[in-house]
Image (cartoon, helix red, strand yellow):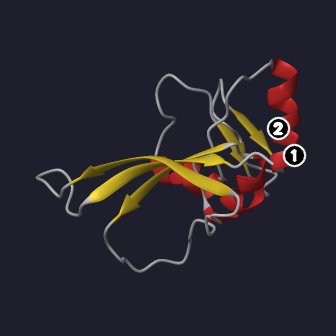
Amino acid sequence: MGRKTYESLGKPLPNRKHIIITRNPDFQAPEGHYAFSSVEEAVIFCNKIGVEQLFIIGGGQIYEETINRCDRLEITEVEAEPEGDTFFPEIDPKIWKETEREHFPADEKNEFPFAFVTYQKIKK
């Protein structure tokens, strides 16, 4: 994840290692977590330590840099149009095939209806 995404969480998520990408050379990852100056450095590190599966959780620039490395996308689509300045890259149907979709209505915990959608990269 990018540093801004990490900082927006407020603290590390439980039961997982965080890999934070930042251009800030003074940023210190919390103990047990890691910071790198590029996606490439982070991927090399993960390969060296034998990470089997990585999850990219944002922000926008990190998504742009990594979407072509992914083989599966797990997307939450919210039926709302909030203002914002960061967006997920376009999901090209020539590259990605929707394989699963689960809808949920608005309720006491969720103001808007939403869906969990899985896309698989189309093998060529």
**Would residue 36 be found to the left or right of residue 30 on screen?**
right
| Quadrant in the rendering for residue 36 | top right
- Check disc 1 and give the amino acid type: Glu
- Check disc 2 and give the amino acid type: Val
Given the current orientation, which residue lies at the most extreme left position? 108
Q: Position of residue 56 (x, y in %)?
A: 63, 45
**How far, Cα to Cα, is label 1 from label 2?**
5 Å
| Quadrant in the rendering for residue 30 | top right
In the rendered image, the vertical position of residue 67 relative to residue 99, given as above or below: below
Q: Secondary structure at mark 1?
A: helix
Tell which of 48 and 114 is nearer to you.
114
Q: Position of residue 5 (x, y in %)?
A: 56, 54
Please give the residue where the numbered disc 2 appears in the rendered image. 43
Q: Position of residue 123 (x, y in %)?
A: 76, 45
Tell which of 32 and 68 is nearer to you.
68
Please give the residue where the numbered disc 1 appears in the rendered image. 40
Q: Which mark is residue 15?
A: none
In percent of the image, x 66 and y 53: which residue is there?
2
Mark 1 and mark 2 residues within 8 Å of each other at the beta carbon: yes
**Would residue 30 be found to the left or right of residue 77 on screen?**
right
In percent of the image, x 88 and y 34: which residue is there?
44
Q: Position of residue 88 (x, y in %)?
A: 58, 65
**Would residue 21 be found to the left or right of residue 75 on screen?**
right
Q: Residues within 10 Å of mark 1 (few under 14, many from 20)?
A: few
Number of callouts: 2
In the rendered image, the vertical position of residue 81 relative to residue 59, given as above or below: below
In percent of the image, x 81 and y 39: which residue is there?
42
